[in-house]
Amino acid sequence: MRTANSHDLLTQTLQFYSQSEIAAYCGKSVRTIRRWESDKTCPTIATAALREMIGVKISKAPVEGQPDFRLIDLFAGIGGIRRGFEAQGGRCVFTSEWNKYSTKTYQENFMDNAEVHQFIGDIASFPKNSVPSHDVLLAGFPCQPFSIAGVSKKNSLGRPHGFECTTQGTLFYEVARIIKVKRPAAFMLENVKNLLSHDKGNTFKTILSVLRDELKYDVHYRVIDGKHFTPQHRERIVIVGFRETTEFTFDDLHLPAEKPLLGSILHKTDGTEPMLPHDGDRFFDHSSRKVQHKYTLTPNLWTYLQAYAEKHRAAGNGFGFGLVTPDSITRTLSARYHKDGSEVLISQGKGKRPRRLTPRECARLMGFPDDFVIPVSDTQAYRQFGNSVVIPVMQEVARIMIPHVKGLLAQECSRQRLSLVA
């Protein structure tokens, strides 16, 4: 076995530490460490320090409270995906979210005194080498069309090819670039079900080609309906990839056979509705045991929605509002829910106008616990929950993913030990 050279040691050290941590230990600037990594050169004098850093990490026995894996949260929204993976022992070391309202909600719920990590806005303008080393990459990236025109011509001219050509300018490109540079043990990407058929299937084919053929990850995907965990029909595609081949299979998912009903997340009018200090009476009037009147549709809006539905029924279309009761499962909550609430209207009895879900009920519909703080306006809250994920789905995906991640990390640790003693 050959002895690892200083650049090999730098690459190994970056599997465990960030550039800033290495810079501090070696007495150098982050810019210097970044140059060493990008130039694939590292002075021999740094070898001893790098060996010490790796030795400390791989010889350290697991201790209570130590995270099992590190994750980064891209296109983070309000942190629904992160919550699912933190439930399996992960620690977030980097977050990217550009929307200022989502950032406010995210930071209100995650950035407490015990949490110190980098939070940035637009990932597109952030140097990929500066993303901290991590074990699992999480991203709910937006769906965009890819252009594959001119690939052959670019190849002949020696210009960028592969995903550098086919996906550049899209947000998936930013995810692919980070995976290429940082090589995490695994990733989990989430998107709408329509990603499969987007642009006649070309978008999804390109994504799979990049992940499997170019980045060389072992990739699996499945559409999962959130109705198994919360009373909402919400189909999303989940794409999972591992740096090496594993025994992972989506067949290990446990989808509860008994589906919850809407009544389980609605405000309770029998006196048992909890008084949440961060909500107060904003959504629910505890003294009268009623949902605040502002969530009941106005006469004009209710008349309009009924006329609109009748118009489309007469034309043979299926468009219309979704009137539900506590025994129902709702349609998919969308980011446009704040406009008229038409996809999920709660019946308040015969002859009475229905009401919207309150933002707290929307949070529950997505699987957020009641300690989740909603610091933004109702309009922004509706947008945020409509764009979020069903947290129990993410928890279940994380449950079947993380044992394989830990297996890959253990293998890597063994290889590091062998390299150090060679």
Image: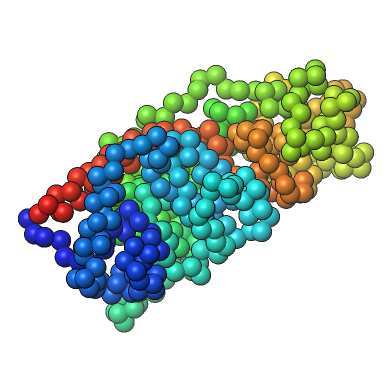
Screen quadrant of the C terminus: bottom left
Residue 223 in view of the camera:
no
From the viewer's perspective, tell me whether residue 262 is left or right of residue 241. right
Q: Position of residue 44 (x, y in %)?
A: 19, 71
Instruction: Please identify the residue farthest to the bottom as the structure is shown.
Output: 157
Q: Is residue 15 left or right of 336 when viewed as pictured?
A: left
Q: Residue at x 41, y 29 (%)?
A: 253
The picture places residue 395, in percent across and down from the top left corner, at 48, 35
Up-down relation of residue 207 to residue 168 (above or below) = above
Instruction: Indicate the quadrant where residue 43 lies.
Output: bottom left
Determine the residue located farthest toward the left in the rendered image: 1
Viewer-proximal residue, 84 or 35? 35
- When the figure is inspected, residue 77 is found, relative to residue 159, above or below; the finding is above
Q: Residue at x 25, y 61 (%)?
A: 50
Left-right relation of 177 to 384: left
Q: Residue shown at 38%/64% (left/top)?
A: 24
Give residue 401's position: percent from left, percent from top. Answer: 37, 38
Residue 163: x percent and y percent?
37, 65
Whether residue 421 is visible to the viewer of this picture, yes or no, is: yes
Q: Residue at x 36, y 49 (%)?
A: 135
Q: Nearer the viewer, residue 263 or 299?
A: 263
* The furthest residue to the right: 299
Q: Quadrant of the N terminus?
A: bottom left
Total marks shown come to 0
As drawn, is 65 to the left or to the right of 194? left
Q: How is the image coloured?
A: rainbow
Quadrant of the rendered image containing residue 366: top right
